[in-house]
């Protein structure tokens, strides 16, 4: 069960590192909104290292797209405590993690909703998120279409200060004329002594706002007042910045906001006495000069579909808007898609590999895993597929999670379009998120070796001859034999039982197949090097990995020593440079990987 919790001040220490390392700009991520939206049931969870929010929308929980893990090497003690013990969380060494963990995190969240017989909803999703869901979960989500009332307005801070161009000329006039009409003008940074006067101004503004279409009703008034009071009561802890405008010693406007990330500031609240023409332009202009210069972008938040707010925010001609749409997955859609994928994989294996009905029945009864069925669809038809079967790899006495690829193929009429390359690129990223260290396979045809080498694989494995006595003496004897090997793919008892079924079907199953070549691809370079360092604790070296076009996070420099490995930022004086293929050759140079009793 995924444990969500309400957000308190102490939780900001956990959340803020994620915002520093991602380009998220939505107003829901500012510290003020994270802490004041608890009235909407706002909660957070760390799922496989990713940060996830959920809150109540239309009477049910809805979720945000996850934020990727914080890069390794960034010191955040509280975050480390939260992640401690989560063996499957993803660690990446680059600032941009693309789809890292998202498919697995979303699957976990969706499964939990389905277990409670609830649809799974994601809100505040942009086109990139929509494209990802359509790619990762084809046919499993319905999309709301444009929810423009939720789109955030993003302006350049310098444009709010300088008001350039003809379009902003009316605001320049407000700025120049306001001091002429109100010469006794003063702007002050917001501080606790001014809060009572702010609340009085809020009441005056609230009394008039509904009439001009800036509020939706009494409930909105109450919630906004409670939110502002909460911020004022905990001003320092919120980390907010604000300012107030005075005319003749009377407060006529106040505003405050808080950072979202390292370059974006959220303008949370602006209230003013509209009897002073141009007052919003003046207070905003002053406030933009008060906030730290590092904030290049200003989020004016959404317009809630209210015409008055839309006109006011659009009048600044924002640089762009943040798309915030909605995606919903229903249990019946998921079941339907899973059945389509299973049926499609079955058809492809029968058509492409000429597998018999009996062999297919054995596979789909004893071996098949829905999570390992990677497919590419076209108009509801599976045209390309690969089965990623989970295994453990024994490496000089230490183990790692890996997969063995089986039944990788494309329908004849769809060949020549590089579908396998695209499918495996997506699969490799998924395996990274699942905590897999290597991807392995056996090939027979020489032409396939060249294809897989282009995808990052290296020929470093064998399909060895089995001692018939060891095999016939049962799993205990076989397990003792396999654990005596330096590098081997381990068969567990479940796999062993499946093999017995296959052996009864095909008496030649245990025979040696010397013409098959074993290939390995490194999926997680850092974990692979840690495995190497643990097994060779007496060795110290630095190396650079290049050329991984599928998982860019793998490219970079690494230091190995004292039984561990780490990613390093500085790549000076590194003499050893390896491609992702050459890295596999380096890791298995002393002992090739043995791959006995594998499905072929």
Image (tube, rainbow, N blue to C red):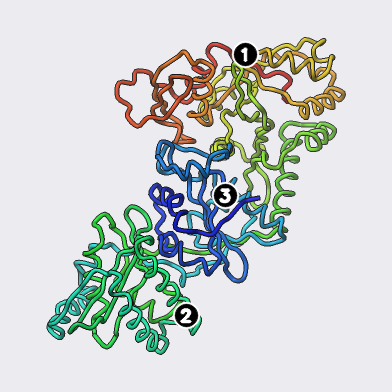
Q: Residues within 10 Å of mark 3 (few under 14, many from 20)?
A: some
Q: Which residue is mark 3?
A: 135
Q: Which mark is residue 269?
A: none
Q: Residue 344: x and y, percent?
A: 72, 44
Dot 1, crowdedness within 10 Å: few (<14), some or many (≥20)?
some
Q: Secondary structure at mark 1?
A: loop
**On the picture, is 328 further left or further right than 65?**
right
Q: Which residue is mark 2?
A: 222
The answer to which image quadrant residue 76 occupies is top left
Question: Which quadrant of the rendered structure holds the C terminus?
Answer: top right
Residue 143 rendering spot, x and y as whole percentages = 58, 63
Q: Residue at x 51, y 50 (%)?
A: 51
Q: Are marks 2 and 1 in contact (CB under 8 Å)?
A: no
Left or right side of 32 for 420: right
* Image position of 332 with respect to 487: above or below: below
Where is residue 282 shown, x and y percent of the image?
22, 75
Gap between marks 1 and 3 measured at Cα: 39 Å
| In this view, the mark in front (2 or 1) | 2
Secondary structure found at label 3: helix
Return the residue nearer the eye: 405 or 574. Answer: 574
Mark 2 surroundings within 10 Å by alpha-carbon count, few (fewer than 14), some (14 through 19), many (20 or more): few
Is 412 in front, or is 314? 314
Whether 299 is drawn above or below 487: the answer is below
Instruction: Give x and y (percent) for residue 57.
Output: 57, 68
- Report which residue position mark 1 lands on: 486
């Amino acid at each position: 069960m995924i444990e969500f919790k309400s957000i308190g001040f102490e939780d900001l220490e956990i959340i803020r590192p994620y915002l520093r390392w991602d380009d998220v700009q939505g107003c829901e991520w500012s510290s003020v909104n994270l802490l004041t939206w608890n009235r909407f049931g706002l909660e957070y969870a760390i799922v496989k290292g990713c940060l996830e929010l959920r809150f109540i929308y239309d009477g049910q929980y809805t979720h945000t797209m996850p934020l990727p893990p914080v890069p390794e090497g960034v010191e955040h003690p509280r975050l480390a405590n939260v992640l401690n013990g989560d063996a499957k969380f993803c660690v990446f060494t680059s600032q941009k993690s693309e789809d890292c963990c998202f498919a697995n995190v979303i699957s976990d969240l969706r499964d939990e909703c389905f277990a409670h017989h609830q649809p799974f909803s994601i809100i505040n999703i942009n086109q990139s998120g929509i494209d990802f869901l359509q790619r990762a979960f084809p046919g499993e989500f319905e999309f709301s279409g444009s929810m423009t009332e939720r789109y955030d307005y993003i302006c350049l801070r310098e444009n709010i200060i300088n008001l350039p161009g003809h379009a902003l000329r009316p605001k320049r006039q407000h700025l120049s004329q306001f001091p002429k009409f109100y010469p006794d003008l003063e702007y002050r940074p917001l501080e606790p002594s001014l809060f009572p006067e702010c609340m009085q101004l809020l009441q005056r503004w609230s009394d008039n706002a509904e009439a001009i279409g800036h509020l939706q009703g009494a409930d909105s008034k109450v919630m906004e007042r409670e939110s502002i009071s909460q911020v004022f009561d905990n001003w320092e802890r919120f980390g907010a910045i604000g300012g107030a405008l005075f005319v003749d010693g009377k407060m006529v406007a106040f505003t405050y906001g808080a950072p979202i990330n390292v370059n974006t500031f959220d303008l949370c609240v602006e209230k003013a006495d509209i009897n002073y023409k141009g007052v919003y332009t003046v207070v905003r202009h002053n406030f933009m000069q008060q906030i730290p210069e590092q904030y290049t972008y200003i989020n004016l938040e959404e317009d809630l579909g209210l015409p008055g707010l839309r006109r006011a925010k659009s009048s600044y001609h924002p640089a762009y808007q943040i798309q915030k749409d909605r995606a919903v997955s229903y249990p019946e859609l998921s079941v339907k898609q899973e059945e389509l994928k299973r049926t499609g994989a079955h058809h492809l294996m029968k058509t492409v590999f000429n597998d018999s009905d009996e062999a297919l029945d054995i596979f789909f009864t004893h071996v098949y895993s829905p999570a390992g069925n990677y497919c590419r669809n076209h108009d509801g038809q599976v045209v390309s597929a690969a089965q990623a079967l989970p295994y453990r790899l024994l490496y000089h006495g230490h183990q790692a999670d890996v997969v063995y690829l089986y039944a990788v193929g494309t329908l004849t009429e769809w060949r020549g379009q590089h579908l396998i390359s695209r499918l495996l690129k997506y699969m490799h990223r998924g395996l990274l998120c699942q905590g897999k260290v290597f991807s392995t396979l056996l090939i027979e045809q020489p032409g396939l070796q060249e294809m897989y080498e282009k995808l990052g694989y290296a020929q470093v494995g064998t399909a060895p001859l089995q001692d018939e006595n060891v095999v016939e003496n049962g799993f205990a004897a076989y397990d003792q034999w396999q654990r005596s090997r330096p590098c081997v793919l381990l068969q567990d008892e479940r796999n062993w039982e499946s093999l017995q079924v296959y052996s009864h079907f095909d008496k030649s199953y245990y025979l040696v197949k010397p013409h098959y070549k074993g290939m390995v691809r490194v999926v997680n370079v850092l974990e692979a090097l840690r495995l190497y360092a643990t097994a060779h604790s007496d060795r110290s070296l630095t190396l650079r990995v290049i050329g991984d076009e599928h998982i860019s996070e793998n490219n970079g420099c690494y230091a190995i020593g004292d039984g561990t490995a780490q990613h390093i930022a500085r790549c000076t004086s590194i003499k050893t440079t390896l491609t992702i293929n050459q890295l596999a050759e380096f890791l298995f140079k002393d002992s090739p990987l043995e791959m006995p009793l594998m499905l072929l």
